[in-house]
Structures are given as structure tokens and as C-alpha cells.
């Protein structure tokens, strides 16, 4: 899975949950800019960062990576 595909999945899930970027950023401790870069496929988030994002989006990393 590419960074762009991963970012798109994060953004899609966040929107399905009607969660604005600033809310997810606040939950995860990320800046809105960093979250935007992740969603745009322009950042290389660590496993820990992805785990934190997925926790608040009720996703499991293996499910997202496998698809």
C-alpha cells in the first residue's frame, strides 16, 4: 500500500465518522498540518502514529494494510 492509498483510507474513514481534521488531530496529538500531510500521502507516519490514528478511527492496521 502506498502512502497516498493509506492517506486516502484514513481520510475516507474520518469523513465516514463525520470527524473534522482538527478533532482527529486533537485526539492524536498531531497538528492539523501533519494530519493533512498524512492524508495527502506526503508524510511518512511512524507505526505508533498510525496506530494512534487507527485507534480513534476504530480501524485495525492489518485490515487497512491488507486491502
Image: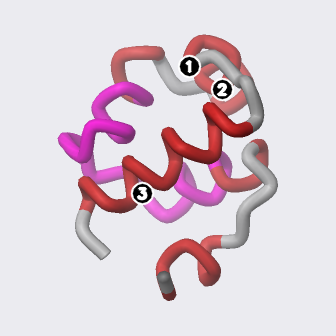
Q: In percent of the image, x 48 and y 79: which residue is there?
A: 65
The stretch in magenta equals 35-53
Q: Is residue 3 left or right of residue 18?
A: left
User: In terms of image quadrants, where is residue 25?
Assistant: top right
Residue 47 in the image, given as x and y percentages of width and height:
49, 64
Asked if the residue under mark 1 is in contact with the one under mark 3, i.e. CB atoms within 8 Å, the reply is no
Q: Nearer the viewer, residue 55 or 18?
A: 18
Residue 48 in the image, given as x and y percentages of width and height:
56, 57
Q: In percent of the image, x 67 and y 54: which residue is there?
A: 54
Asked if the residue under mark 1 is in contact with the one under mark 2, i.e. CB atoms within 8 Å, the reply is yes
Q: Is residue 64 above or below residue 52?
A: below
Predominant secondary structure, magenta span: helix
Q: Residue furthest left?
A: 42
Determine which of the numbered discs, if any, sits on residue 21 in the image.
1
Determine which of the numbered discs, if any, sits on residue 46 in the image.
3
Determine whether the residue tagged by mark 3 lies in a helix, strand or loop.
Answer: loop
Q: In percent of the image, x 69 and y 16: which residue is there?
A: 23
Q: Which residue is mark 2?
A: 24
Q: Is residue 3 above or below residue 52?
A: below
In whole angstroms, how far apart are the C-alphas of marks 2 and 3?
16 Å
Amino acid at each position: 500500500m502506498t502512502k497516498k492509498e493509506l492517506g486516502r483510507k484514513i481520510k475516507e474513514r474520518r469523513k465516514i465518522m463525520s470527524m473534522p481534521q482538527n478533532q482527529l488531530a486533537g485526539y492524536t496529538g498531531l497538528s492539523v498540518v501533519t494530519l493533512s500531510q498524512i492524508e495527502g500521502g506526503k508524510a511518512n507516519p511512524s507505526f505508533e502514529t498510525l496506530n494512534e490514528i487507527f485507534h480513534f478511527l476504530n480501524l485495525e492496521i492489518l485490515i487497512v494494510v491488507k486491502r
